[in-house]
Amino acid sequence: MLSRVGLAGYTTADGLLDEDEGADDQEGAAATERATGPAARRTSTSSRLVRDAAIGARVKELHRHACQICETRLQYKRRPYSEAAHIRGLGNAHNGPDEMPNLLCLCPNHHVLFDGLEIYVDVDGIVRRTHGDKTVGRLRQHNSHHIDGAHLDYHRTLCDLNRMARS
Ligand SMILES: [Zn+2]
């Protein structure tokens, strides 16, 4: 991007560019549209957060891929399937840490609902619906997987804001 505005070779005020930003030049050439055949491919660039897959894998293994909310243990392609959900999001607005106390092992349904602020964990460890407070179940815990209550507080606050915004 900097080459377009004549600043190639300089660093920004934030410091050195990461590799993703430097790879921007290929984008235009690859963006050709086609009338028929396979969907056109487009090389895009973005700055992505690097997640440590090993941490998520460890949480899922500890829980043997069973959802901590509903105990669902999906079989997918002959293997158990679960998702590691961050309690406090990793992105810019939330800046949650990528570590086990900020993770839950969830089934895809509960992962979506949790990320979408449709369910939360109350101070007693009960999972409730954001709208109506109806009980969903109890969050199952594992001795070797400590969950940081401060992250659950943070998520609960977001759910409160979500509730207020809709009411
Ligand atoms: Zn579930």
Image (cartoon, grey):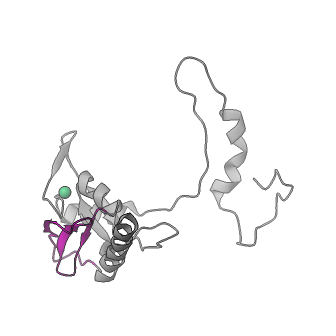
Residue 140 in the image: above or below residue 21: below
Seen from this angle, which residue lies furthest right? Answer: 6
Residue 55 sits in quarter: bottom left
- Examine the rendering and report whether any part of residue 65 can be seen: no
Which residue is nearer to you in this view: 123 or 33? 123
Q: Magenta-highlighted stretch: main secondary structure?
A: loop
Q: Quadrant of the C terminus?
A: bottom left
Residue, x 14% and y 54% (percent of image)?
A: 72
Report the magenta residues as a range. 118-147
Numbered disc total: 0
Residue, x 24% and y 78% (percent of image)?
A: 146
Residue 81 in the image: above or below residue 104: above
Residue 74 in the image: above or below residue 33: below
Image coordinates of residue 52 in percent, x first then y, are 41, 64
Image coordinates of residue 155 in percent, x first then y, are 34, 73
Is 56 on the left-hand or right-hand side of 18?
Answer: left
Which residue is nearer to you in this view: 43 or 107? 107
- Examine the rendering and report whether any part of residue 125 can be seen: yes
